[in-house]
Structure formats: C-alpha cells, structure tokens
Image (spheres, rainbow, N blue to C red):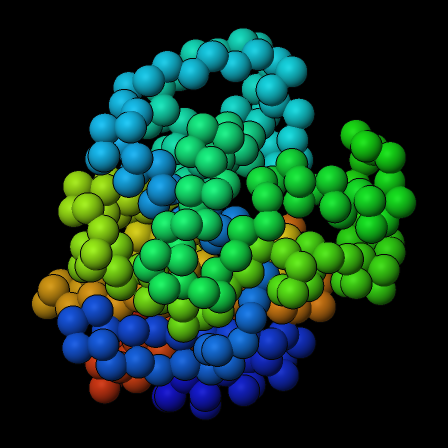
Amino acid sequence: MTLAATAAPLEAELGLTAFVHARDLDSDAQVGLRSEDLVVTASVFKIPVLLEVCRQVAAGERAATDRIDLGAEDFQVLGGTGIAAFSDPISLSLRDLYLSMMNVSDNRATDVVMDLVGWDRIAATLAELGMTQTVLEGDTAALFASMRDDLGIEPGGSMDGVAKNRTREYRAIRAQDPRHSHRSTPEETTRLLGRIWNADGIDASACAEVRRVMGMQVYGHRLRTGFPGSVSVAGKTGTLSFIRNEAGVVTFPDGRRYAVAVFLRHRTADSVAPDLDRAIGTLGAAAVGELRGEEIVLEGPLDSDML
C-alpha cells in the first residue's frame, strides 16, 4: 500500500496525526505526508548536536579522547538514562559522552556536549547547510524548565503524572508546540540525513562518525519494527508525552539507502505504547516501499535483540 493508504486507517484507529517523509539517498526520489509541516522533534534534535561535535573533532578543535569530569550535582535533569541516572562522580571521554547522548538518549550528556560545542555553533552549522526550519531552543534542562514554568511547578518539582492528570493544560505548553520547541520538518530532517550519509558539504570523517554512532542506538522498537532483519537501521528516537518520533536511514542488502522521518502526535501520554511504536515502523516501511515500488515484508518474528 502507499504511504497515504497506510496512514489513514492507522490515524483513525490510534487517534494520531502522522508527519512523514522518506528520501532515496541516491536518486533523491521522495514521498511524504504533511512533510512540510513543522513538528516537535523531541530528542531527534540530538542529531544536529552530534553532527556539530563530530565536525569540531574532525577540524581538530577538540579531541574525541578529551576527558570530562562530572559530579553528582551534574546529573539533575529529567530523563533517567545514561549519566542522567548516575549518583557518583565520573570521568569519561568526549566520544563516550556523545555516544551516551545518542544510543540511550542521555539528556545530561546532551547538555554537557551542547555546553562544550556551543549552541551558536550548532545553529550556524544548520544555517550553513540550508536547514532553515530546524531550530534548537536551548538544551534539555531549558526545555524541562519551560515545562515546569508553563505548568506552575516549582524548580526541581515532580512532573510525575502531569501529562495524564492535567492533559488539556499539558498539551498547551510550549514544549508541545512546534512554534516554541525544538523543531524541524520531516522533509528537512531527511535532507539533513542525506547530507550526512552522502558527506555532502560536510567533512567525510565527521559524517562517518555520525553514521557510526547513530547505528548504535539501543532502541529498536520503532522504525526497526517495519523492516526485515536484513535491513540495517541507524536512527534517533524522540519522545515527549504526546509526541513520538524516529528519524534515521535504512539500508537494504542491495545497497539502496533511504532517509526516513516519522513524527507522531497522539492522544495518549503513556511512556510505553507498543502500538504507537509499531505505527512508526509501519509508516516508515510504507514510505520506503512506495519509493522502492514494492511492499516491505518482514521475514518473520522480531528477534529479541531488535527490541
């Protein structure tokens, strides 16, 4: 089925709105659904952060082996993965820091990397590459501070249950609005991925490192679910209550490569939502299948290491 024919029943059944774009990285053939609309990227915004730190390493401005020392006071940020969940002082390399930022979506690692490379440098790189719709509104600490401010929660106060218990109010906060939050469009997201995968106007070694790190993401329950095991997936997820995303590149055994971006707005605030995760895979596979002129067929049950 086409992307449009696949999306319509999914949107009706699951109460979601899908924003999708897929791009053949060799022919530049494209297919999309609401692909020019602004979307909240959530942690997909970490792709430009990764690109900038890899560019600076490639340029010799800093070394991947630079040591960063962090204490317990550095771990106070929402999103308890990676060092954001740690309790004791640590020392790790810049390379391991940005790996944690991507492969477990570590929010504290993200903020440290952004402090090191500079928000202004990230914005300048996006502008240089022509990504006019992709905007980062500060780091993750600033994002969560805006959420607390909008909801009248004291700094450091608990956000537990807010999305479920104050749904209408929560949907109206700036973090959920692409005019005021980290944002992009599905089309621009795949265009950025295409420039990285083709080393188009970007240092080849920086691009290679971005591709390596994105291939190490541990979350394989979204785009991955739409493709057979013979297809490799390198991506980055993003989640913020009523927003669920993934953007990445899928590579088939025949060597053909496709950048895919799927952004969902939905009605449930559940952090665990397998139907929504599978919808991302289904929509991504439908978009790529349309470009390939064939239906993407899974080879069998998903292996445990894909989940």
Q: Closer to the camera, 21 or 54?
A: 54
Is residue 220 toward the left or the right of residue 40 in the image?
Answer: left
Is residue 237 toward the left or the right of residue 292 in the image?
Answer: right
Query: x, y (%) of residue 51?
Result: 34, 45
Query: x, y (%) of residue 178?
Result: 63, 64
- Which residue is pictured at 59% across the width and 44% down the height? 138
Q: Is residue 287 above or below residue 215?
A: below
- Which residue is pictured at 55% across the width and 79% down the height? 10
Q: Is residue 303 above or below residue 275?
A: above
Is residue 271 toward the left or the right of residue 68 in the image?
Answer: right
Is residue 82 toward the left or the right of residue 32 in the image?
Answer: right
Q: Is residue 45 above or below residue 103?
A: below
- Which residue is pictured at 42% across the width and 42% down the height? 121
- Residue 167 visible to the viewer: no
Q: Residue furthest left?
A: 254
Quadrant hosting residue 107: top right
Quadrant hosting residue 25: bottom left
Q: Is residue 82 above or below residue 92?
A: below
Query: x, y (%) of residue 103?
Result: 40, 39
Q: How many marks?
A: 0
Q: Closer to the camera, 19 or 205?
A: 205
Query: x, y (%) of residue 14?
Result: 63, 74
- Which residue is pictured at 54% across the width and 9% down the height? 89
Q: Residue furthest top?
A: 89
Q: Closer to the camera, 235 or 30?
A: 30
Please identify the quadrant where the N terminus is shown: bottom left
- Residue 3 visible to the viewer: yes
